[in-house]
Amino acid sequence: AGWRMNVLYSYLVDLENLGLDKLSKSLRKHLRRAESKGVEVLADGSPHDVHELLVKTGERQGFEPSVNGDQLEALRDRFGEKLRLRVAVKSDDGTPVACLVTTLDEQRSTVYALVAGFDRQHADLQGASLVHWREMEDTRGRGMKIFDFVGGDMESTVQFKASFGGDLIPY
């Protein structure tokens, strides 16, 4: 009596078999659009740009980021290359359009996507798709084997995560 089970899920992408052929048709289209519109991904993005994008995402989804730009900067300084702040920008003026914060677990050869966000005003540029794809490509080149989206329960993000061809795994 009173028992309730709440199974949580995450999408895991096998980076060893990463390829465009594994992506959904719509995601491949989004990546081409981002590239043709001049979106670039910065490997070492500004913590303050990341925070601003997370604030915009939080306003849409009803949450407040748990860290500010200064705290993100301190975390990056503390963890070095294990904490990665990726920012997709418009190449013509450098406007940040999407971000992704990941951490690398070299012992498990796993990349964990901690948080991501985007500016809805620039959603048509598909920066969120490109920033995730570039992180997967880059970390595969660094020997990582798994990209963990860290969650697959929010309806608004499930389709996006699934488009990368990963497996939905309970944890």
Image (cartoon, rainbow, N blue to C red):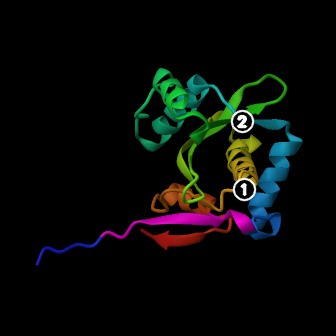
Kindly identify the amino acid type of the residue bearing the numbered disc 2.
Answer: Ala
Instruction: Note whether 71 is above or below 63 in the view shown.
Output: above
The residue tagged 2 is 43
Q: Residue at x 22, y 72 (%)?
A: 4
How many marks do you count on the picture? 2
Q: Nearer the viewer, residue 101 or 95?
A: 101
Q: Is residue 9 magenta?
A: yes
Percent of width and height locating residue 171 = 42, 68
Q: Residue at x 66, y 57 (%)?
A: 144
Label 1 crowd (10 A; few <14 / some 14-19 / many >=20): many
Please, what secondary structure does the residue beneath circle 2 have? loop
The image position of residue 157, as x and y in percent, is 55, 56
Q: Nearer the viewer, mark 1 or mark 2?
A: 1
Relative image position of residue 138 (x, y in whole percent): 74, 48
- Structural crowding at the residue carrying mark 2, measured as other residues with C-alpha within 10 Å and reported as few (<14), some (14–19) or many (≥20): some
Res. 74 mark: none
Q: Amino acid at mark 1?
A: Arg
Of label 1 and label 2, which has the lower sequence position?
Answer: 2
Q: CA distance from mark 1 to mark 2?
A: 14 Å
Which range of residues does the magenta coloring cover?
6-16
The image quarter in which residue 66 lies = top left
Magenta stretch encompasses residue 85: no
Going by the picture, which residue comes out furthest to the front? 107
Seen in the picture, residue 109 relative to 36 is either above or below; the reply is below
The residue to which callout 1 is attached is 140
Which element type, helix, strand or loop, lies under badge 1? helix
Q: Nearer the viewer, residue 28 or 137?
A: 137
Left or right of 62: which side holds 78?
right
Residue shown at 72% from the left, 42% from the top = 127
